[in-house]
Amino acid sequence: MNVDELLRDALREQAADSASVPSGFADRVLAVRHRRRVRTIAGAAVATAAVVATAVAVPVLHSGGQDVRPASRMNQSDIIAHPDQSPPRDLIAAGDTALAAFSTYKKVGLPGRDAEMRRTFGLLNQKTGKYDRTTRWSWVDVAPGMRTAAVLEQRLPVDRIGLLDLITGKVERWIELDKGVGGVKFSPDGRKLLATTYSKSPDRLYWSHKMNVNGKNQPGPVASRTGFAVVDVASGKAGWHELPFWKDEMGWSPNARADLAFSHDGKLVYEQIPTAPGRIYYDLNGRKVATPAVEKHVTWAEAGLSPDGKLVGGDFAGQGDEIASAIVDPLSGRMITKVPGQQLLAWADNKRLIAWGCDPKKCRGKGEFHNQLLLLTIGSDKVVQLSDFRKASDDYPGRWTPQFTTR
C-alpha cells in the first residue's frame, strides 16, 4: 500500500516498525514445505457462516521437554478460522496459505508541519500461535514457511535488513547494504530478498509538497525511489541497480512508496503503475523486459496467479447488487467464472482463494469497508468466514491490512 492510499484511508476514517550466521539459520529461512500436509478438514460451511474445528497435533518434545516446532506446524488443520476476531489474535490459515502478519497505521505530525504514516504490526509468534503487537519495525515481510521475517527499523530509509526469528523473537542476523532501503520482500522460494531503495522516506509527507484535500491543505508525498537490490539470503551478497521512479508523459509521479515485487516465478521483478500496461517488468539486473505471457492479464487484484499458474484472481466483476470477483484465464484474459468476494487477496490452493467480503446488507457506500476475511471455492457458493468484520481496536487504531504467505 503506497502513501497516497494510506492517506486516503486515513481521511476516510476521519470522515465516517553483521552478526555471524547461527547454525542451521539459512535452512530455516529457505524452508518452504512443498509436501502435502495432513490436515483435519474443518466442519461443513454454509453460504454465510461456518463453524471451524481447531485440531492441535500432539507435540513432539525436545530432549529438554519443550516443543520446538512452529505453532503453525503444531496445527496443520486445512482451515484455521477465528470468525469472532478482528483484528485477529490467533493464527488464521487456509490450505497452503496463512495470515503471517497484519498492519494498521496512523498519521503522526512532525516538525515543520510534515507528517509520517507509522505502522503497528500484528506479527505471528510461532511459539504461541498468536499475533504479537509491535511498533518496533517500519516494515515487515514474512518468508515462505513463516519461520523468518525481514524487518526494517524506524526512520526510513535504513542501511540494513534484519532477519527476525519468529519463534525466539530475536534478530539473528543483519544484512548490511550501502543504499537506503525503504521496502523489502522475499522471493517466492525464500532464497532472495528484493530491497527497494529510496533517498527519502516513502512514508513521510512534506508540507513543502502540500496538496489540497476537500478544501484543506495537507502535507504531500515526495517521489524518491533510487533503485533496487536483489539480496542472496544465505550469503548476504547484494547487487544494486538504478531504477528511478516511474513517471507519466507529463513527468508526474503519483506516489511516494513505489516498492518493486517479484514475478510469480521469482525470475523477474516488476513495478505497478496506474496506466496501461499496469506493470513494467525488469530482469534481476535492472533491464526492462517483456511482460511474461502468463502474467499479461494479472491486474491490481492482490491474489494474482494461482500456484499452478493456470488461473488469475481478477478484479471486482459484480453486476448491480452482486458482490463478485472474476477468475480469469491467464493467457487469453477471458473471464472463466466468478466467486462471491469483494477483493481477492491470496490463493489458498489452486481452487480456493482468501478474499475480503462485505456484509451483503451493507455493501454499498460506507458499508463497502465493513468487510471480513472469507475463504471462497471456485465452482461453489460455499463461503467460510476466517475473521470477524474489519474494524479498529484500542491496540490497533485503524483498519488492518493482511499479509499472507505460504505455511
Image: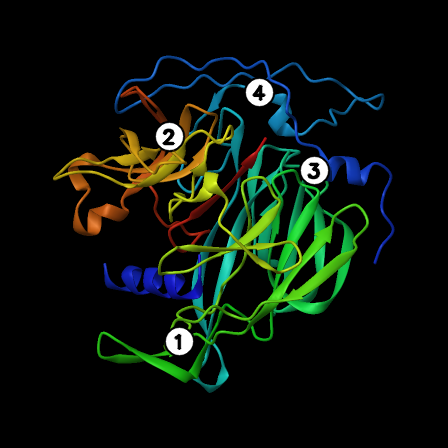
Q: Are marks 1 and 4 in contact (CB under 8 Å)?
A: no
Q: Quadrant of residue 272 in the image? A: bottom left
- In the rendered image, which residue does mark 3 sit on? 167
Q: Are marks 1 and 3 in contact (CB under 8 Å)?
A: no
- In the rendered image, which residue does mark 1 sit on? 252
Instruction: Identify the mark at residue 76; answer none if there is no mark.
Output: 4
Whole-angstrom CA distance, mark 4 to mark 2, is 18 Å
Of pointers 1 and 4, the one earlier in the residue sequence: 4
Q: Are marks 1 and 2 in contact (CB under 8 Å)?
A: no
Q: Callout 2, which amino acid?
A: Pro
Tell me: 326 left or right of 301.
left
Whole-angstrom CA distance, mark 1 to mark 4, is 48 Å
Whole-angstrom CA distance, mark 2 to mark 3, is 25 Å
> Which of 9/200 is in front?
200
> Which of 320/113 is in front?
320
Residue 165 lies, in percent from the top left, at 71, 43
At label 2, counting other C-alpha atoms closer than 10 Å, the crowd grade (few under 14, some 14-19, many 20 or more) is many
Residue 231's place in the image compared with 355, above or below, is below
Of pointers 2 and 3, the one earlier in the residue sequence: 2
Residue 388 can be seen in this image: no
Instruction: Identify the mark at residue 83; answer none if there is no mark.
Output: 2
Tell me: 168 left or right of 330.
right
